[in-house]
Image (cartoon, grey):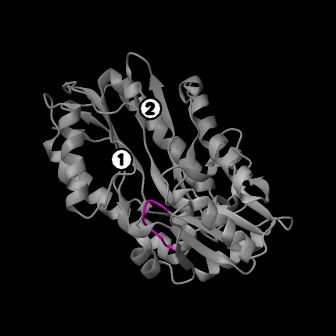
Amino acid sequence: MSQRIDRLRQAIPAEADALLIIKPDNRTYISGFTGSNAYLLVGREVALLLTDFRYIEQASAECPYFVVRDYAPVLSDSLKQALDDANIRVLAFESDFVTFSTYHELKEKLGVTLMPTTGLVEKLRQVKDAGEVENMQQAALIAEAALAEVLPMVKPGVSEKFVALNLEFALRKRGAERLPFDIIAASGPRSSLPHGRASERLIERGDFLTLDFGAVYNGYCCDMTRTFIVGAKATLEQERVYSTVLAAQEQALSALRPGLIGRAFDKVARDVITAQGYGERFGHGLGHGVGRAVHEGPGAGSKSEDLFSPGMVITVEPGIYLPGWGGVRIEDMVLVTETGYRNFNSFPKELTTLG
């Protein structure tokens, strides 16, 4: 945590005296505070956490590198006093999170120059340390064990919601503190919906079933997707679509290395899918960063200029979606290493029939 504070201090623009952090994931990353209400003030010589009475004891235990103060009775007054005490005249803030009304309140009451910034903490969060990687690996192990437990329950006649409910129970039973997003369980023609959350639809013989889900462990997320056939052998068209998606993912993984740009990574998979005539049916980016949030930097879309470096974690999830027919997505979460990548996932990817 001390190193994170030092790195952040170096990232604060020279024109600013300090950064005000309100965004929850950034707040936890920099301070360690896990409560729901706090304001961080980080400057060259100041590291202050303001919270209310409910969290004073908790923050004092969780945040040894911060001075913790109760901001009662009025936050703006306490914050102004802290700025005056530290001789802060130019205050940077998270312009992509602070609301318009909050901005005007700060401007009116603090008496300092406000400097909008974006992505200062988020950029630091892109490169994971060993502890973060271990938490994400544990989340992935929980997810894969839960999936293995639930798959024997899947057969024609059960509903998407039945599968999702049992998967969520298995995730929590195995140690997930929460889900990073609502489970996607989309079958048959609904599998063409990239974000098709579970419905009452009963899964039919011969359906594709796409399951996209994750777990959160010690505040860190994982994200994975597998697509299955239920109750029947795959048709030739199903096999062709599935094998195309799998080949696209394998080609992308083989190209992954430090120094690769997000759009180039995306293009490797996209070219495989386009060559088979499905290019227009792969409408999202190849992947996204994962960490404290399930969607963060770096990006791996067709316009991404993000440069991959060791320690970054990204998903690799090509897909083909044919409205009225169905779709396939296969997703792994990987760590960029000095020489290539390390896959958090080991769950089989060959096309499997369930039930």
Tell me the element at label 1.
strand
The image quadrant that residue 153 belongs to is top left
Q: Relative to 280, is 110 above or below?
A: below
Q: Secondary structure at mark 2?
A: loop
Residue under circle 1?
213
Q: Which mark is residue 194?
A: 2
Q: Position of residue 166 (x, y in %)?
A: 18, 46
User: How many labels, in total?
Assistant: 2
Quarter of the figure with the C terminus: top left
Q: Earlier in the sequence, mark 1 or mark 2?
A: 2
Instruction: Identify which residue is drawn at 14% across, 32% down.
Output: 158
Task: Tell me, yes or no, if residue 104 can be seen here.
Answer: yes
Asked whether, in this view, residue 163 is left or right of residue 281, the answer is left
Look at 63% across and 48% down and name the residue there. Answer: 98
37 on left or right of 114: left
Amino acid type, residue under disc 2 in the picture: Pro
Nearer the observer, 16 or 271: 16
Task: Report whether residue 96 is seen.
Answer: no
Q: Which residues are magenta?
A: 32-37
Measure how far apart labels 1 and 2 are at the Cα level. 12 Å
